[in-house]
Amino acid sequence: NLARVQQTRGRYVEAAVLCQRALQCRLRTLGPDHPLTASSLRHLADLAAAVGNQEESRLLLKRAVRAENAIAATVFAASTRRQRRDFAALLADTTDDLLTLCLQAGVTDPQARRDGLELLLQRKGWLLAAESEQSRAWRLAADPQCGSTFRTLQGVREELARLALTAPPPDQEEAFRQRWGELDAQQTTLEARLARQSAELARRAARRQSDLVAVARALPAGAALVELIQYRPRHYRAR
């Protein structure tokens, strides 16, 4: 797009203006929890890092991570294999960008180290959940107490996943926002109902809320958690 062209030419101010316009448009049209919104945040973060503003870039990438996390469970639970693969690639790009900045700043910045570790735990949690989602779905669909509620929830998730991975035409933006809000509310209600019906889902919801403090408390006294990850470091250079 035009912002990328301006960035390639070294016109970072002009590129940032265009990216901000795109971000505001996507926030207005798609809301904060859409992969395309996260993509706009990543582009702005890339521009900030290219001109040496690493802290601003990290903050923008954290916003992108929150946007991706908000829809990750739905996409992994109800999308097609190709959609999951494409979404996982998007998660990998954001992970690589933020880890690069966290590692660069982490020597002297404790918050950067915390950001990096939280990111790894979040990503790992979503991927592990995705691997076991299908078997859980079969069990819940067959459960006489939860089956009907779960099948209704799955239909809502499938439509949300489809909306999450597409952008509406300009003349359908208002209908998109309204439908997204309706589906999101339905999903929340159905998940709460299932949590009351299924102890397994209640435990799963609790695991999603885990953070670094919860993980630290779960470790035995004197133990340490070592995370190994393969990632692609980014090289931010102004052109």
Image: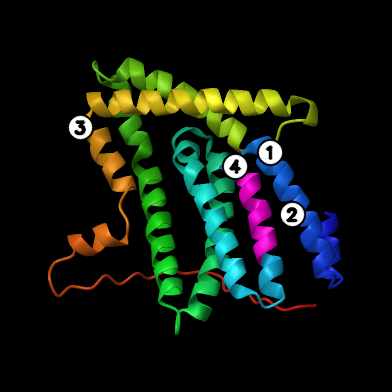
Q: At x 59% / y 53%, what residue is drawn?
A: 90
Mark 2 and mark 1: span between their CA atoms? Answer: 12 Å
Residue linked to disc 4: 34
Nearest-to-viewer mark from 4 and 2: 2
Q: Which label's residue is closer to the chain start, 2 or 3?
A: 2
Q: Is residue 71 visible?
A: yes
| Residue 208 position within the rendered picture, expressed as x and y whole percent measured from the top left | 33, 46
Where does the magenta region start and end?
Answer: 34-45
In the image, is residue 37 part of the stretch drawn in magenta? yes
The foreground one among 137 and 220 is: 220
Mark 2 and mark 3: span between their CA atoms? Answer: 44 Å
Q: Amino acid at mark 4?
A: His
- Which label was assigned to residue 28? 1
Q: Amino acid at mark 1?
A: Arg
Residue linked to disc 3: 199
CA neighbours of label 4 inside 10 A, class few (<14), some (14 to 19), many (20+): many
Mark 4 and mark 2: span between their CA atoms? Answer: 16 Å
Q: Which label's residue is closer to the chain start, 3 or 4?
A: 4
Asked if marks 4 and 2 touch (Cβ < 8 Å), the reply is no
Q: Amino acid at mark 2?
A: Gln
State the SS at label 2: helix
Mark 3 and mark 4: span between their CA atoms? Answer: 30 Å
Q: Residue furthest left?
A: 221
The foreground one among 125 and 48 is: 48
Asked if marks 2 and 3 touch (Cβ < 8 Å), the reply is no
| Residue 104 position within the rendered picture, expressed as x and y whole percent measured from the top left | 53, 80
Q: At x 69% / y 42%, what residue is drawn?
A: 26
Residue linked to disc 2: 20
Nearest-to-viewer mark from 1 and 3: 1
